[in-house]
Image (cartoon, rainbow, N blue to C red):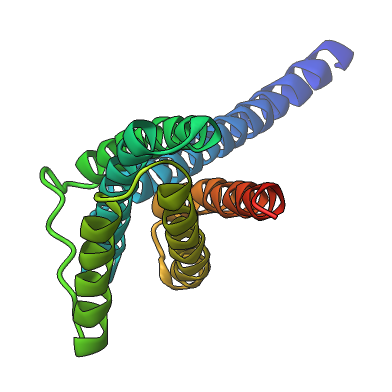
C-alpha cells in the first residue's frame, strides 16, 4: 500500500514539475523577445532618417565648419604668429567636426549635405555681410589682420554657440543632439581663446 501511495504521489508530481518548467521556458522566451524588441527599437532610432528641420541644422553646421576652415587657413597665411596658431586650431577642430557631421548625415540617409540656404531676409543679409567681411580682411596683414579677424571670429562663434543651444532643444534625433552637445564646448573654446588673443593684442599695442 505504501509503495502504491508513493507511485501515485510521483505520478501527480511529474505534471506539476513539467508545468513549472514550461512556465520558466515561457518567461525566458518572453524576456528574450522583449530584449530583441528593445535592441530593434534602439537600432531603429540609430538609423532613423532626420526630419526636414534637422537636415537644416546639419546643413548649417556643415556651412559653419567650411567657413571656419577657410578663416583658419586665412589666419595661417596673413596673421601674426599667435593668430597663425589659432588659425591652425580652427582648421583642425572644424575639420574633425565636419568629418563627424558627414558620417552622421550618411548614417541617417543624407548622402550629400545640402547647401545652407538663408530662409529670411535677415539671414540673407547676415550671410552677405559675412562674405563681404571675409573679402575685406583678405587684403590685410599682420596686426591689422589680427584685429579684424579676431573681432569677426568672436562674433561668429558667440552667435553659433547660441544657435547650437537652440538646436539642442529643438532636435529630436539622439545622435544629432549628441553631436551638438559635443560641438558646443569647442565653439565656446574658440570664442574664449579669440578674446584672450584680442586682449593681449590690445595690451601690447598700448
Give the total of numbered labels.
0
Viewer-side residue, 3 vs 194: 194
Viewer-side residue, 85 vs 4: 85
Residue furthest bottom as drawn: 121
Question: Quadrant of residue 195 in the image?
Answer: bottom right
| Residue lying at 72% horizontally and 52% vertically, measured from the top left | 203
| Residue lying at 49% horizontally and 61% vertically, measured from the top left | 151
Of the 4 image quadrants, the one containing the C terminus is bottom right
Res 192 seen here: yes
Viewer-side residue, 188 vs 194: 194
| Residue lying at 26% horizontally and 86% vertically, measured from the top left | 122
| Residue lying at 51% horizontally and 60% vertically, measured from the top left | 154
Of the 4 image quadrants, the one containing the N terminus is top right
Res 50 seen here: no
Question: Quadrant of residue 76 in the image?
Answer: top left
Question: Quadrant of residue 103 in the image?
Answer: top left
Left or right position of 108 against 97: left
Viewer-side residue, 49 vs 62: 62
Counting from the top left corner in percent of width and height, residue 80 is at: 48, 35
- The image shows residue 40, relative to residue 180, as above or below, that is above
Counting from the top left corner in percent of width and height, residue 33 is at: 44, 40
- The image shows residue 67, relative to residue 53, as above or below, that is above
Residue furthest front as drawn: 206
Counting from the top left corner in percent of width and height, residue 128 is at: 19, 72
Counting from the top left corner in percent of width and height, residue 178 is at: 50, 49
Left or right position of 95 against 199: left
Amino acid at each position: 500500500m505504501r509503495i502504491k501511495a508513493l507511485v501515485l504521489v510521483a505520478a501527480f508530481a511529474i505534471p506539476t514539475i513539467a508545468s513549472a518548467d514550461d512556465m520558466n521556458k515561457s518567461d525566458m522566451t518572453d524576456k528574450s523577445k522583449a530584449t530583441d524588441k528593445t535592441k530593434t527599437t534602439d537600432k531603429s532610432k540609430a538609423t532613423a532618417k532626420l526630419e526636414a528641420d534637422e537636415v537644416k541644422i546639419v546643413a548649417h553646421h556643415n556651412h559653419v565648419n567650411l567657413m571656419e576652415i577657410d578663416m583658419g587657413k586665412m589666419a595661417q597665411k596673413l596673421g601674426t604668429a599667435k593668430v597663425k596658431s589659432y588659425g591652425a586650431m580652427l582648421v583642425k577642430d572644424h575639420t574633425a567636426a565636419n568629418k563627424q557631421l558627414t558620417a552622421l548625415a550618411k548614417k541617417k540617409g543624407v548622402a550629400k549635405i545640402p547647401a545652407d540656404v538663408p530662409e529670411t531676409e535677415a539671414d540673407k543679409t547676415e550671410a552677405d555681410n559675412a562674405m563681404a567681411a571675409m573679402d575685406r580682411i583678405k587684403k590685410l596683414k599682420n596686426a591689422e589682420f589680427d584685429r579684424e579677424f579676431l573681432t569677426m571670429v568672436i562674433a561668429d562663434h558667440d552667435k553659433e554657440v547660441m544657435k547650437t543651444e537652440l538646436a539642442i532643444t529643438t532636435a529630436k534625433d539622439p545622435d544629432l543632439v549628441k553631436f551638438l552637445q559635443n560641438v558646443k564646448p569647442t565653439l565656446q573654446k574658440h570664442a574664449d581663446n579669440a578674446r584672450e588673443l584680442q586682449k593681449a593684442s590690445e595690451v601690447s599695442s598700448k
